[in-house]
Amino acid sequence: MRIAIAQLNPTVGDFAGNLGKIEETLKRVKSEHPDLVAFPEMFLTGYPPQDLLEKQWFMDRAEQALEALRGLSRREAETGILIGTISRSSRAPGKGLLNTAVLLKAGETVLSQNKILLPTYDVFDEARYFDSGDSVDVAEFAGERLGVSICEDAWTDPGLWRTPIYDADPVADAVAGGATLLINLSASPFSVGKDSVRHHLFTTHARKHGVPFVLVMQVGGTDVLGCDGLC
């Protein structure tokens, strides 16, 4: 299975511009014949959109952008597109939104995986905006069974925290569900030494579960956050 890792810099709220970056990327890698092109967490909307998530028009435009991406997926039918966006939550009571990874092939949704672990420390405030996903699904794709996680879903190593802060492990759940390839879509901000922490974290997952692990990182700056894309 050939995977193109598209570590790019989206612009918050620039749906047309972000779609343009996706289309340009697909053209650029076409000669390499990838089975899958993977983009970072919430790439379609840009990250972090913060209080734009509370605007109805922002969700509407995110849905319109995903439909436009479906059209692009139909035109590039030989290549899967894995991308981060947002979707509506029907949970009541709830926030009404989910942080979602969508896998498209020939315009069809192969997998829709919602982020389960929502960080609320340091610069993160995701529980303010999102409901947590309630299941981990695995998708058959290009001869593999893909287990897709979103950023924090992989930050479950007990050694990272003074005391455990999560009682779920989405990566382990994906492997238990039969995943033969793990992919994490991330928009992880830079801090000194964080690249070595990421490297330890993701190699530990791969060794523990005996399954290859692919990390797709956002790069560039947004407001006060900068993403380095290193691991």
Image (spheres, rainbow, N blue to C red):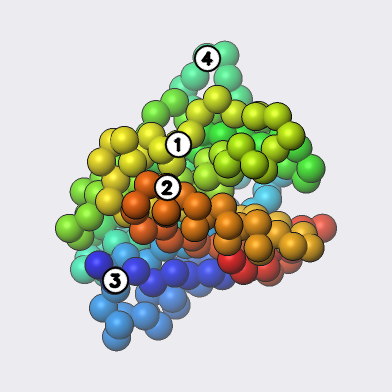
Q: Is residue 103 or residue 172 the one in the foreground?
A: 172
Q: Looking at the image, is 80 positioned above or below residue 86?
A: below
Query: Image height check: is 204 above or below 157?
Result: below
Kindly report which numbered mark, 2 or 3, lies closer to the viewer in this rendering: 2
C-alpha separation, residue under disc 1 versus residue under disc 4: 23 Å
Identify which residue is drawn at 62% across, 68% down: 230
Of callouts 4 and 3, which one flags the residue occurring earlier in the amino acid sequence? 3
Q: Which residue is mark 4?
A: 92
Whether label 1 touches label 4, CB < 8 Å:
no
**Which amino acid, mark 2?**
Lys
Q: Is residue 98 above or below residue 93?
A: below
Q: CA distance from mark 2 to mark 3?
A: 23 Å
Question: How far apart are the two marked residues, 4 and 3, measured between alpha carbons?
Answer: 40 Å
Where disc 3 sits, the SS reads loop
Residue 170's disc is 1
Identify the residue under disc 2: 208
In the image, what residue occupies the spot 74% across and 34% down? 162
Of callouts 2 and 1, the N-terminal one: 1
Structural crowding at the residue carrying mark 2, measured as other residues with C-alpha within 10 Å and reported as few (<14), some (14–19) or many (≥20): few
Please, what is the three-letter code of the amino acid marked with disc 1? Pro
Q: Are marks 2 and 3 in contact (CB under 8 Å)?
A: no
Marking on residue 2: 3
Query: Could you tell which of marks 3 and 1 lies nearer the N-terminus?
Result: 3
Q: Earlier in the sequence, mark 1 or mark 4?
A: 4
Q: Quadrant of the N terminus?
A: bottom left
| CA gap, disc 2 and disc 1 | 14 Å
Q: Earlier in the sequence, mark 2 or mark 3?
A: 3
